[in-house]
Amino acid sequence: MPSSATPSVAHAIRAAMLTAEPEAKAMAARAVARDWRAGRLAFAFDVAMPDAPARPDTPQLLPPNAMPKRGRGGSERGRIALLHALCHIEFVAIDLALDAAGRFGAERGPSFVSDWLAVAADEAMHFALLARRLRTLGTFYGDLPAHDGLWDAARETAHDIAARLAVVPMVLEARGLDVTPVTIERFEAAGDLRSARILQRILDDEIRHVRFGTTHFARVCQERGESPPQLWKSLVERHFRGAVKPPFNDSARRSAGLSCEMMAGVA
């Protein structure tokens, strides 16, 4: 059992979220997950999560509708732009997972913290793989603009664990299950097999991340006496600015625990 001198998991999570430099944030997230697994952090929530995580000076953050068009990844320039966008998504996903563990862990328990710190460590590893791949292509994370729309979902759902699970893993990450196979095919067709292998690794991990979301969402629904499909649809309609619509990666979604009812369009 942790002693009274053992630092709290909340304090470690907050420190990682307030680390701005990208590689340092990735290392901090992996360290939090490692220390939690090893019993070096107490299940204690003695500090609040920040309203927003620390961010580096680059990339320049633009509104989503002001982002330059990336093309479809046929040219090397287009592939670099796509890899940079994916690298930024993984960078923000580190903080999304950390925030879930730190913001809702007290109410959801140690297993919830374990799952979302594992996700944070995965996202940190994904970021590192993509950042390294960008460097081999002669560029760096931060060289191109990006948008901060993903963190908007965290702000919108900071009040309710059910809303957070419904929107972040079960909509945003699930969308990655749908689009990543096509992206992999484009990189393979262009002969960029190294990038394709990285994206396949990310896809395999994201199935597990979405499954964490669906599993914990089902538990919350059971506790509240709610129907998972009905609550999911109502929360997505209330908190997600967009539509959930095909094409879907049916097999990946089923593996992640998303039912057919949760694949129906949400206007």
Image (cartoon, grey):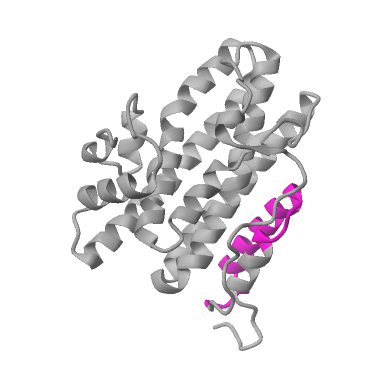
Write the residue at 37% across / 34% down.
Answer: 252
30 inside magenta stretch: yes
Please say whether residue 6 is visible from this viewpoint: yes
Along the line of sight, the residue nearer the viewer: 156 or 106: 156
> Does 195 sit left or right of 207 as displayed?
right
Can I make out residue 39 in this image?
no
The residue depicted at 32 percent of the width and 56 percent of the height is 217
Q: Residue at x 63, y 12 (%)?
A: 191
Residue for point 61% across, 28% down: 67
Residue toward you, 59 or 35: 59
Relative to residue 161, is residue 55 depicted above or below?
above
Quick one: which residue is furthest to the right in this view? 138
Q: Say whether residue 37 is magenta.
A: yes
Percent x, y of residue 12: 64, 69
Rendered location of residue 170, percent (x, y): 37, 45
Of 57 and 29, the residue lying toward us: 57
Q: Position of residue 2 (x, y in %)?
A: 58, 82
**Can you say which quadrant of the picture contains the N terminus?**
bottom right
Residue 74 position (above or below residue 121):
above
Q: Main secondary structure of the magenta part?
A: helix
Residue 263 position by quadrant: top left
Residue 264: x %, y % from top left: 24, 34
Q: Which residues are magenta?
A: 16-43
Q: Is residue 55 above or below residue 226?
A: above
Quadrant of the image containing the C terminus: top left
Q: Is residue 26 left or right of residue 185?
A: right
